[in-house]
């Protein structure tokens, strides 16, 4: 079975093949950069990072574009409130977004265009829409006339007759229909503006993605992604304006990720229940964040909580514990062989609409088998079977964005995170473990037991093995 993707447009899974054999063109809506990135941003970024990684692992040449909205009402209002320019504000949060994504091991897309860099192509596209009679100018503003475009509503499944005029549309008596949306907004005092045939102004939100994707990917491309909240009106409007101006289908496959919820409510700034990526990374390892976000199918919601993150952390500990054993066994040898049944199950799950939950299941099955073989084999027995498991778990982890460092480095980082949240001093723990090892060698078991209890009272769990004693908090 080849790759199948759930297409929001058709509302079913379809066999995927790119329009140009061997080459995939993908566009994902990026953030509006007026504030710190939160876990909702993290989910979309991680989901499509895995899509990008998997398509490349299957041998496709992928052109991946993710934009920045760097001019918008929210940006203008925030910049004015802070007394700085929109360019300074957006630049600050673009840098922070990149730092957050790098921390989460999210690969950079091939292109990351900004709306302000595409004002010329946007104006040209709006001019064509006006010439075609599907857009009209009013007092320096330009609107798209949705009633002129017969396919409006095909992505969201809405019809104009059923829509609520007050739902997520700008109410303006100058518009021919309440659902008409702005392609160009006339300049207001205190706002950045650019020249246009309709006077100074700035782009509307929806048109920027159509112009940027046209420039980088062409009139029709393979995959367009984003959060479920973008289906209407943003992606619906993208389809209308792009297909109206180009006269050909805009996107072949539409993908939308589910929300990050807190107590079953969507995480959002308006509800005050959102967590920034940086707040979460102060407490949890970035790979634990990835594992949590990938633990559910991308179209399903994930419920964020400390308990859920603790589960992800514990699961990641199990992965790295096994990986540490394999790294010790194979030293610095690069994995050379693989193709176990676990890798086949992993690829089968990923081929089924990027089912990362099923893929993680295959990875953990491989780890359980590796642990069993490591327990059974004679010490230092680097068998071909274990070599295959080492290779395949490495490949699976790479597609999911895991195993970005050595196991020792991971556990060192985890000790630092845990110490920061509990106040436990890692140096003190290491000193006690060294003292305990000395006591055991001297057969002073009473002192060794007393140190174990002292460590346990601190919340430290220790594990003895032939290679030494390891520890963790919790």
Image (cartoon, rainbow, N blue to C red):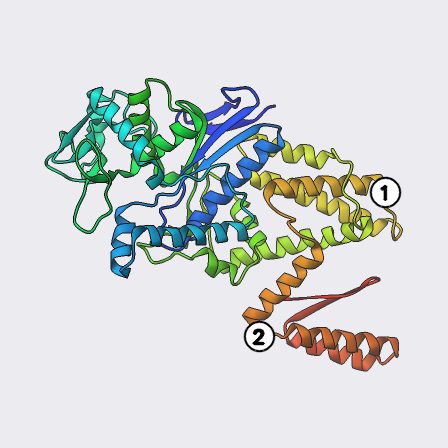
Relative depth, front residue between 301 and 94:
94
Instruction: Count all numbered tags in the image, as a single digit.
Output: 2
Q: Is residue 444 left or right of residue 349?
A: right
Which residue is the site of mark 1?
383
Horizontal side of residue 173 vs 74, given as left or right: left
Q: Position of residue 317 (x, y in %)?
A: 65, 56
Residue at position x 29%, y 22% in the image: 245
Position of 152 compared to 65: left or right?
Answer: left
Image-based side of 11 in relation to 407, left or right? left
Q: Position of residue 58 (x, y in %)?
A: 62, 29
Q: Residue 96 versus residue 239: which sits nearer the camera?
A: 96
Secondary structure at numbered mark 2: loop
| Res 339 → quadrant | top right
From the viewer's perspective, is residue 119 above or below residue 73? above
Could you tell me which secondary element the residue under label 1 belongs to? Answer: loop
Q: Is residue 275 above or below residue 445?
A: above
Residue 423: mark? 2
Mark 1–mark 2 Cα distance, whole angstroms, equals 42 Å
């Amino acid at each position: 079975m080849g790759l199948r993707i759930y297409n929001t447009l058709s509302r079913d899974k379809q066999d995927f093949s790119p329009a140009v054999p061997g080459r995939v063109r993908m566009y994902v809506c990026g953030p509006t950069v007026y504030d710190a990135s939160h876990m909702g941003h993290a989910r979309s970024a991680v989901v499509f990072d895995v899509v990008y990684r998997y398509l490349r692992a299957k041998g496709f040449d992928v052109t991946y574009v993710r934009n920045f909205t760097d001019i918008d009402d929210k940006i203008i209002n925030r910049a004015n409130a802070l007394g700085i320019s929109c360019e300074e504000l957006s630049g600050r949060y673009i840098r922070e977004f990149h730092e957050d994504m790098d921390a989460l091991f999210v690969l950079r897309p091939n292109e990351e265009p900004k709306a302000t860099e595409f004002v010329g192509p946007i104006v040209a596209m709006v001019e064509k829409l006006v010439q075609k009679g599907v857009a009209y100018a009013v007092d320096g503003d330009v609107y798209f006339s949705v009633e002129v475009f017969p396919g409006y509503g095909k992505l969201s499944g809405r019809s104009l007759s059923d829509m609520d005029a007050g739902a997520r549309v700008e109410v303006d008596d100058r518009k021919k229909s309440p659902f008409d949306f702005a392609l160009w907004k006339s300049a207001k005092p205190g706002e950045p503006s650019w020249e246009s045939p309709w006077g100074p102004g700035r782009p509307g939100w929806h048109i920027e993605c159509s112009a940027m994707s046209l420039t980088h990917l062409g009139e029709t491309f393979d995959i367009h992604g984003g959060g479920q909240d973008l289906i209407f009106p943003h992606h619906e409007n993208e389809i209308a304006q792009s297909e109206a101006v180009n006269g050909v289908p805009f996107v072949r496959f539409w993908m939308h990720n589910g929300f990050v919820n807190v107590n079953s409510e969507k995480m959002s700034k308006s509800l005050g229940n959102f967590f920034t990526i940086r707040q979460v990374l102060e407490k949890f390892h970035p790979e634990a964040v990835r594992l949590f976000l990938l633990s559910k199918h991308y179209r399903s919601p994930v419920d964020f909580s400390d308990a859920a993150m603790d589960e992800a952390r514990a699961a990641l500990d199990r992965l790295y514990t096994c990986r540490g054993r394999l790294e010790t066994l194979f030293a610095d040898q690069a994995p050379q062989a693989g193709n176990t049944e676990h890798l086949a199950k992993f690829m089968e799950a990923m081929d089924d609409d990027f089912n990362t939950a099923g893929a993680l299941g295959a990875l953990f099955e491989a780890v359980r088998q590796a642990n069993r073989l490591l327990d059974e084999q004679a010490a230092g027995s680097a068998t071909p079977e274990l070599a295959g498991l080492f290779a395949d778990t490495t490949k699976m982890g790479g597609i999911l964005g895991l195993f970005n460092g050595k196991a020792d480095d991971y556990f060192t980082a985890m000790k630092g995170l845990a110490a920061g949240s509990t106040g436990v001093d890692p140096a003190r723990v290491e000193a006690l473990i060294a003292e305990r090892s000395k006591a055991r060698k001297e057969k002073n078991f009473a002192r060794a037991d007393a140190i174990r209890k002292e460590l346990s009272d601190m919340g430290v769990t220790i594990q003895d093995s032939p290679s030494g004693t390891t520890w963790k908090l919790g």
